[in-house]
Image (cartoon, rainbow, N blue to C red):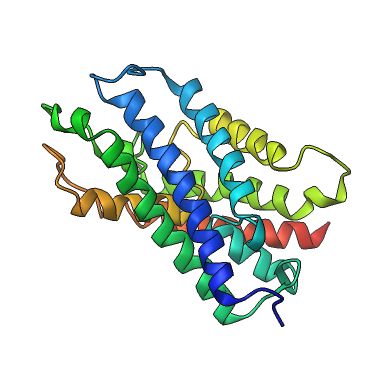
Amino acid sequence: MSTISLWHVFFSEFLGTAVLLTIGTSLCANNTLRTTKGFNAGWIGITFGWGFAVFTAAYIAFKSGAHLNPAVTLGFALHGSEFAPGIAVTWSNAAMYVSGQLLGAFVGSCIAYLVYLPHFDSVTRETSLGIFATTPAIRRPASNLFTEIAATTVLVLWLLVSNYTESSLGPLAVAVVIVAIGMGLGGPTGYAINPARDLGPRIAHAVLPLRHKGSSDWGYAWIPVVGPLIGGVAGALLAGAL
């Protein structure tokens, strides 16, 4: 039995993921929108920013183990009997994790939109999708899918085995891993490595009254969902083989 309520599981994941995407979507907006003070900061700023966003969100979602990612939840479900200490692997708990993550990602992206509203209003061409969701540098579905699988496998494998090495780094270690994945594996697809991180903001992009927003590219949207989920399974299998 879980030692915390389903509501606490949901709210912990919701709030943590909302903070993650508030920061993450905002840093993409700051880098992309021409009228901001951070315009064109570049890939290093993006990767370190997302790493620090995960660092921040992981502390906030401590009660649920700070999965913040359905692929991570899937990996933990396949690897053991608990999602986090005291939270059993059950369908109801899994539903609370994933629903909290998806809703939090949507809300966080909407908050970022409000923060940068005057800058979105000044947009004169289609620039907004890459602020909210991932897009491939070269669109080759098989290659894009493999990239997301590989990057998420590294993340989930590390999360599942990290407790076996003594460290006092805590969530900072996760941030370092996220930065490493972004710097090395992020170039081809923008490293979603998280179905909620891509799908929630993509829905926000579709429904928000953005100027010149263009397509939400639903034809590509399955890749940053399916790829990370497969990576979650692969990471769990590899961790179990160690």
154 to 237, vertically: above or below: above
Quarter assignment of residue 107 = bottom left
Location of the N terminus by quadrant is bottom right
Left or right: 171, with 241 as reference point? left
Spot occupied by residue 59 in the image (x, y as percentages of width and height)? 64, 47
Left or right: 184, with 173 as reference point? left
Q: 115 or 174: which is nearer to us?
A: 115
24 to 100, vertically: above or below: above
Quarter assignment of residue 136 = top left
87 to 239, vertically: above or below: below
- Residue name at image x 34 percent, y 34 percent: 138
Residue 76 in view: yes
Q: 88 or 76: which is nearer to us?
A: 88
Spot occupied by residue 125 in the image (x, y as percentages of width and height)? 13, 29
- Residue name at image x 28 percent, y 55 percent: 203
Count every numbered label the image shows and give the total: 0
Location of the C terminus by quadrant is bottom right
75 to 30, vertically: above or below: below
Left or right: 33, with 15 as reference point? left
Spot occupied by residue 135 in the image (x, y as percentages of width and height)? 34, 40
Residue 139 in view: no
Spot occupied by residue 27 in the image (x, y as percentages of width and height)? 40, 31
- Residue name at image x 66 percent, y 73 percent: 4
Quarter assignment of residue 36 = top left
- Residue name at image x 10 percent, y 26 percent: 124
